[in-house]
Image: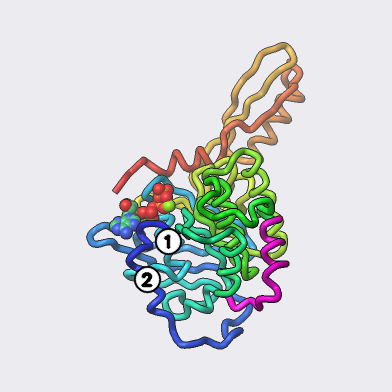
């Protein structure tokens, strides 16, 4: 478990049993934060954040080291209590109804806690037991999850003996044990090799296709760009922008670069403001330019450009 979670775990805040199904089934937002703030002493780790994660989205939370991403996730995951403001996860307040939230969300922290004497299958069984899944279902559940994250060969290995990437995958399996509607993943791709990254992306897409909302923090912008329907960019605890990446880029008046390669071996880079501009550039080149166009590529990694233009590398 990440450092900042230690020492401030909200387990003691658990309330008496809540009845299953007391949360209305249809909040449109999987996560809604209003003025969400977390202070560590004088340091403001999350600063009056307003966040809206649409249900069914793949939502990327992006920000430099120390921006407050993990702190935000820990508040969603019932592990940290906000200093001020409010947060709702699947329609419930994590501080007041932690069990309800935990039933409906799967949380993958930025590192796997240490479990000295547990085998991989025992580790997942432990969490299956914690979620009240009947023992008779464990073998099939554990087998299925290990297949899903490609760890079946390590079923009886000790958790400690796994490589970093394997621990990440086990952590993802753990987040899926109770088949949650919402997945909150804190840098799930860190430590994964290229193949495992591609597989993770495919897996997250198919989980999203099954109706799960996915909130993911990552530094690997190209990966997020391919996957996320919405992103939020934060720095020094503050939310700088949020929405579909294209929309944010447009709001910022972000220009796109188009690289064009011609049959005569020449190449040129053009700047366009939006889709209409881009379409008319293409028309002009094809109709009016003497040179034959062989390549027309939008160059800027949109998210990367967005990230660089919004953040300034402020570290608290
Ligand atoms: N337990 C703690 N006590 C004091 N300060 C903390 C604690 N945990 C986190 N912080 C501080 O809060 C700020 C936000 O940290 P956080 O871990 O949320 O950032 P992050 O966006 O997840 O960064 P990274 O990309 O490096 O994972 C940082 O300045 C960090 O030093
Ligand atoms: Mg973090």
Main SS type for the magenta part? helix
- Left/right of residue 241 with respect to residue 162 in the rendered view: left
Task: Name the residue at the left extreme.
Answer: 42
Can you see residue 290?
A: no
Q: Which residue is mark 1?
A: 72
- The answer to whether residue 75 is above or below residue 281 is below
At 54% across and 45% down in the image, what residue appears? 163
Q: Is mark 2 within 8 Å of ligand 1?
A: no
Q: Position of residue 223 (x, y in %)?
A: 59, 43
Query: Would you call the spot at circle 2 few (<14 residues within 10 Å), some (14-19), or many (20 or more)?
Result: many
Stretch of the chain drawn in magenta: 131-147
At 62% across and 29% down in the image, what residue appears? 258
**Quadrant observed for ligand 1 in the rendered image:** bottom left
Query: Would you call the spot at circle 1 few (<14 residues within 10 Å), some (14-19), or many (20 or more)?
Result: many
Q: Which residue is mark 2?
A: 81
Q: Position of residue 304 (x, y in %)?
A: 51, 39
Q: Is mark 1 within 8 Å of ligand 1?
A: yes
Can you see residue 52?
A: yes
How far apart, in angstroms, are the residues tagged by discs 1 and 2?
10 Å
Question: Looking at the image, is mark 1 or mark 2 earlier in the sequence?
Answer: 1
- Residue 54 tag number: none
At 56% across and 88% down in the image, what residue appears? 19
**Is residue 138 in the magenta section?**
yes
**Is residue 86 in the magenta section?**
no
Q: Position of residue 202 (x, y in %)?
A: 69, 49
- Left/right of residue 164 with respect to residue 286 in the rendered view: left
Q: Secondary structure at mark 2?
A: loop
């Amino acid at each position: 478990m990440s450092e900042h979670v230690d020492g401030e775990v909200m387990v003691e805040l658990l309330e008496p049993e809540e009845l299953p199904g007391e949360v209305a089934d249809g909040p449109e937002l999987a996560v809604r934060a209003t003025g969400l703030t977390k202070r560590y002493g004088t340091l403001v780790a999350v600063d009056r954040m307003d966040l809206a994660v649409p249900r069914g989205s793949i939502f990327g939370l992006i920000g430099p080291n120390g921006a407050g991403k993990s702190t935000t996730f820990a508040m969603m995951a019932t592990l940290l209590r906000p200093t001020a403001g409010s947060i709702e996860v699947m329609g419930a307040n994590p501080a007041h109804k932690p069990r309800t939230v935990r039933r409906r969300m799967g949380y993958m922290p930025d590192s796997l806690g240490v479990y000295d004497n547990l085998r991989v299958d025992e580790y997942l069984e432990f969490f299956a037991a914690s979620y009240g899944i009947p023992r008779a279902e464990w073998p099939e559940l554990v087998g299925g999850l290990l297949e899903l994250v490609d760890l079946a060969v390590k079923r009886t290995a000790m958790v400690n003996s796994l490589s970093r990437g394997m621990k990440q995958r086990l952590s993802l399996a753990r987040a899926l044990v109770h088949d949650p509607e919402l997945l909150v993943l804190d840098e799930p791709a860190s430590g994964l090799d290229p193949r495992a990254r591609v597989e993770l992306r495919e897996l997250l897409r198919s989980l999203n296709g099954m109706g799960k909302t996915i909130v993911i923090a990552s530094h690997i912008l190209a990966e997020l760009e391919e996957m996320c329907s919405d992103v939020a960019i934060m720095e020094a605890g503050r939310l700088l922008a949020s929405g579909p990446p294209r929309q944010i880029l447009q709001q910022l008046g972000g220009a796109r670069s188009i690289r064009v390669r011609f049959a005569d071996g020449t190449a040129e880079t053009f700047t366009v403001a939006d889709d209409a501009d881009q379409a008319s550039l293409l028309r002009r080149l094809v109709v009016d330019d003497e040179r034959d166009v062989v390549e027309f590529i939008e160059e800027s990694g949109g998210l990367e450009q967005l990230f660089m233009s919004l953040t300034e590398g402020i570290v608290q």
